[in-house]
Amino acid sequence: MTVNPVTYTNPEITVQYPGSQVTLPNGFGPVPTLSDTPVFYFDIDNCLYDRSLGIHDQMQVLIHDYFKGNLSLSDEEAHKLHMTYYKTYGLAIEGLVRNNQVDALEYNAKVDDALALHGLITPNLKLRAMLQALKESGSCRMWLLTNAYKNHALRCISLLGLGDLFEGLTFCDYAQTPIVCKPMTGYFTNAFAKSGLKATEETLANTYFVDDSGLNCKAGVDLGMGHVVHYIERNEDYEEVVGSDNYAKYYKAGGRTNGIKIVRNILELETVCSELF
């Protein structure tokens, strides 16, 4: 099996800096040899950069405009259908492709690729130092998991200055029908295979995963991941999680052994996953 490394030079960046050039040695996978070495899976959006940057809000406007314009809906209808698709499928585009036969790559061009990221996402030197220490420790392999298409993922990690720290990337393939995304089991099993994880009960128990979505974190727990971290930036989201009916079922602080750990700052990974550093 041949490994196909991925490199990416971001045309938005005129002066290169550490990590602005993306180099993924194992590309999008598959990694040729299955391994039981622990893997740390990292979400990107609203996780490796903060939601407070406003990119999520910018994306919501573009998605809303797409629903409204392409499906000829009112504002109210567009919002309702968007929320229905997100809650049903985990990703608006999955509902659009499945039920409205839209061109997913056209959607990507009008939404993800249209985001004004340059100037909002900037190098995060503290995050880079933490992740570089994790990589140099040799305690785990580092792999990116995103529900975005590959173009957006590569742009983000380039702008963050993290492009040389990860082994590979699993993205949501908008060219595939049906679209498979987190929190679907098929997305995770594909990611395990592409990243070369020997997905046994034992290795999954020693697998790490951080995401800002509670749905995705719970899916990780249900699949047997033993070290799941939920990054919750906003106070209102935190209060909603700790007040939820299944808090005790899924979260460590709620009483579950090896349950989901909550961090309020991504740099807290060094504390809650201290055994890796």
Image (tube, grey):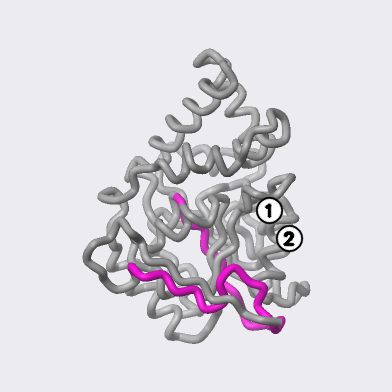
Amino acid found under the numbered disc labelled 2: Leu
Which residues, given as a range, are shown in magenta?
20-45
The answer to whether 259 is drawn above or below residue 98 in the figure is below
Residue 50 shown left or right of residue 102 in the figure = left
Report which residue position mark 1 lands on.
219
Residue 37 placed where, x, y %? 63, 83
The answer to whether 109 is drawn above or below residue 47 in the figure is above
Q: Residue at x 28, y 62 (%)?
A: 123
Label 1 near label 2: C-beta < 8 Å? Answer: yes
Residue 98 shown left or right of residue 155 in the figure = right
Report which residue position mark 2 lands on.
223
Which secondary structure dominates the residues rendered in magenta? loop
Residue 114 shown left or right of residue 148 in the figure = left
User: Callout 2 environment at 10 Å: few (<14), some (14 to 19), or many (20+)?
Assistant: some
Q: CA distance from mark 2 to mark 1?
A: 6 Å
**One can see residue 189 in this view:** yes
Q: Residue at x 69, y 60 (%)?
A: 188
